[in-house]
Amino acid sequence: MTFPHHSSTASPATITSSPSTTTTGTASLVTISVCGVVTMAAVGFVFWLNPMKEDNGSSSPQGGDFKRKRRLIIESPSEATAQHIKQTTVFDPFPTFEAPERFGYEADRDGHWYVGHMMRTKQALPAWANRVDVVIEIRDARIPLTSAQTELNSNLRQAGIRKLPRLVVLNKCDLVTPSMARRAQEMIEAHSNAKCILATSVLKKGVVKIKEFMLSEREIRFQSLGIYGLLVGLPNTGKSTTINALKRLALLASKTRYDSRGMMAGVSRAQARVTMSPGTTELIRAYQLSHNPTLFLVDTPGVTFHKDKTNPERNLKLAAVGTFPDHIFGELYIADYILWRLNNARLFQYVNVCGLSGGPTNDIRSVCREIAFQLTNDPCRDSGAMDVLSGARTFLKFYRNGLLGRYCLDALPSEGELSRYYNNLVEEAEPPGPWGPNAYIPIG
């Protein structure tokens, strides 16, 4: 059978086929289509489990032009001291757009959240620290330095607690770029005596290293007692989610591996309560992870810092990642801070995600009004009134789910930049001469 290539007409004998041939061809097309759909679904599922490890800074499905590599630039020591990051991109879709250099912090918005169960937890931690074998600190990878639980660690040292092996877990690493996560890990391990690992508890990635750390640091002397680990950290950093992820992995291993059949014998299937709002855990409770080996993790409520009026940005960073309830600072105020950080970092994914027709803007109210207008057209919503506050909540949800770009709010200079910065400070402080440097070295 021959098919015409360029002619618009063909003889009936050329295009006529038998019924059996037509049925066979249709079945073949259906088979190819089904195989193609199954293949695409399988590729998508594999990509969801193992996303591409590229430093593109975008996790939004509307990434398109925004999937590009970035490099960290710290222009001056004052900018590094102020904990601000400036990222320049190879391709800037809005080169003429200018963002304000400073954010207008409001003194009356400097909120604080320290409820009763936090004080009870702070008082009970020294007694629990005497019973455990290791201390595991959970931090948010978006604020690896700001979320450090320095006050609890200092309280444990003042109480005379014996030195325990300490592990720092940078949770929610899927919300930052891989280079930023590795840089934070290197910085924590270089400036502290603790080991640091990267994990994503929701996806059950990297949490197995917690079990390996507990088994490597402590030896099980009595099988009935096992090893106890104490989880500490700020609210909503993923402590309860980490416990649930480890219990699910142990249950899966006991069902699929022959040598792990007795791992969950006699172990309760109860899981820690997890919600999106901070402060869900209010009591200290121990959860058994496995029977062979016998491992326990003690879940503690998140404890916030004391109020510090000299550093208003610290509380805003904590509120941006969901450590504080949104009503403490106000949804619009938190969203305005996030918009300012995204504009200064030249991350304009929110233009496509929020459907802004006018491009990027510094006015958070216009962004929230646009989101609220789109919410009013949603047939699934009962109310048709436009609510700007709902738009602010949706904007915060977009950021916390990683749809507005993977971005670290803490400044993470490299080791070379830190050494150059401190060397330049020393050279500036001491004049040239026999006791100082031979000549001044300009900064930069």
Image: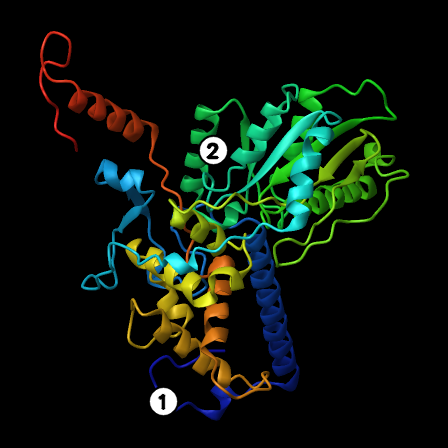
Is 27 placed above or below 124 here?
Answer: below
User: Which residue corresponds to mark 2?
Assistant: 185
Q: Are marks 2 and 1 in contact (CB under 8 Å)?
A: no
142 relative to 342 in the view: left or right: right
Spot the residue most to the top: 434
Is 252 placed above or below 151 here?
Answer: below
Residue 276: image x %, image y %? Answer: 62, 59
Residue 228: image x %, image y %? Answer: 75, 29
Gap in angstroms between the C-alphas marked 2 and 1: 66 Å
Residue in view at x 26 percent, y 42 percent: 79
Asked if one can make out residue 242 in the rendered structure from this viewpoint, the answer is no
Local SS, label 2: helix
Q: Amino acid at mark 2?
A: Gln
Asked if one can make out residue 84 in the rendered structure from this viewpoint, the answer is yes
Toward the viewer: 14 or 129? 129
Q: Quadrant of residue 212?
A: top right
86 relative to 313 in the view: left or right: left
**Residue 158's mark?**
none
Q: Indicate which disc, 2 or 1, sits on the residue closer to the N terminus.
A: 1
Q: Quadrant of residue 186?
A: top left
